[in-house]
Image (spheres, rainbow, N blue to C red):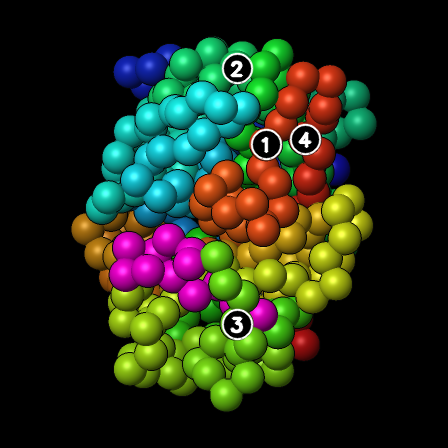
Amino acid sequence: MEIKTKTYPSKKGDITLFTLTNDRGAQVVLSSLGAGLVSAIVPDVKGEMADVVLGYSDPADYFYDGPCAGKIPGRCANRIAEGRFSLDGKEYHLAINNGPNALHGGPEGFQNQIWASEVTPDGKVRFTYDAKDGEEGYPGNLTVVAEYGWNDNCELCLEIKATTDAPTLANFTNHAYFNLSGEGSGSVLDHELKLESHLFLPTSDSLIPTGDLLSVKDTPMDFTAPRVLGADIKADFPALVYGKGYDNCWLLDGWNAGTLRRAATLTDPHSGRVLEVETTQPGVQIYTGNWLAGSPVGKCGRSYNDYDGVAIECQGLPDSVNKPQFPSVVLRPGQTYDQKIIFRFTNK
């Protein structure tokens, strides 16, 4: 494994990029801005390489980008209803940055911070961020460590750990957008997706879960067998109307805390590339890039259009802190948040 680093100045300090190249010549590029994945160059069925992660040529363009491309948002991924929650009898108020709700930890969330970074002795890249008590309205001093490993099987392994000195929320994911034909190649609505889930979370029109879990059977939310992303994306179905496409969470079948299992399989019929995703998290949010238009110019040299990429966000269920029936995202002193996500690139 070869690892190279390069540093770029920015208004918030130096951004470091880490390029990891395996023995097959496939590589990923990681950024200390948001502990992000900014590139994954992997082979298709003919062995031809392409970058399958959406992103920008200028490392500083990742600051405050609407899509949150490739980064780790926090301290709580996804939406919290009205930016409010109660913990141990005390109510907290967060910044409202997504309609009436708080999203991805707020406008100054972890995704817009430069993390401390280093290469570990075993050839991984470790990012660390120390969030202060009260930052973006959240209680507790929280330390989060995200460690990425890349191997010769084209597996990108991400482990995220966090500890706190006071009760707080912790819910992390990676927000990369994938286009297995290559970033800049156009829409992903012809990609096929399979999810290991028979239950999805219905939401309000502002995309806050109602608290119910519904069967996917006989709905456009059924990805229990491979389904083309665009097949029903324009259907007159509440989840698709509210989000202008898929922006929903599914509860993974047989989820058991701490157990790594398959979550999703994404297949591109043109290149033959396949992305398999495994996680220890209870849910997976599928977002078909419904609002990508207007983002910074992509690495391809043009701005992206809506539906040019799909995010597969393994995470705790949205608004869990206000839904006691959902798996908890509360982290307390003495506990360690510890979750894994594996992105495996193959072809067929």
Which residue is at a point 19% across and 51% down the rendered structure image? 294
Left or right: 273 as drawn, with respect to 22? left
Quick one: 138 or 114, which is closer to the camera?
138
Which quadrant does the C terminus fall into? Answer: bottom right
Label 1 – label 4 distance at C-alpha: 9 Å
Label 2 – label 4 distance at C-alpha: 14 Å
Give whichever of discs 2 and 4 has the lower sequence position.
2
Give whichever of discs 3 and 4 has the lower sequence position.
3
User: What residue would you read off at disc 3?
Assistant: 214
Q: Amino acid at mark 4?
A: Tyr
Quick one: 220 or 212, which is closer to the camera?
212
Comparing marks 2 and 3, which lies closer to the viewer?
3
> What residue range appears in magenta?
199-210
Q: Answer yes or no: is residue 240 visible.
A: yes
Q: Quadrant of residue 185?
A: bottom left
Q: Residues within 10 Å of mark 3 (few under 14, many from 20)?
A: some
Quick one: 100 or 310, which is closer to the camera?
100
Give whichever of discs 2 and 3 has the lower sequence position.
2
Badge 2 element: loop
Q: Residues within 10 Å of mark 2 (few under 14, many from 20)?
A: many
Comparing marks 2 and 4, which lies closer to the viewer?
2
Label 1 – label 2 distance at C-alpha: 11 Å
Residue 175, how many percent across, how many down? Answer: 47, 46
Give whichever of discs 1 and 2 has the lower sequence position.
2
Residue 140: mark:
2
Comparing marks 1 and 4, which lies closer to the viewer?
1
Q: Is 151 situated above or below 241?
A: above
Label 2 – label 3 distance at C-alpha: 35 Å
User: What residue would you read off at disc 4?
Assistant: 337
Left or right: 287 as drawn, with respect to 223? left
Residue 330: mark:
1
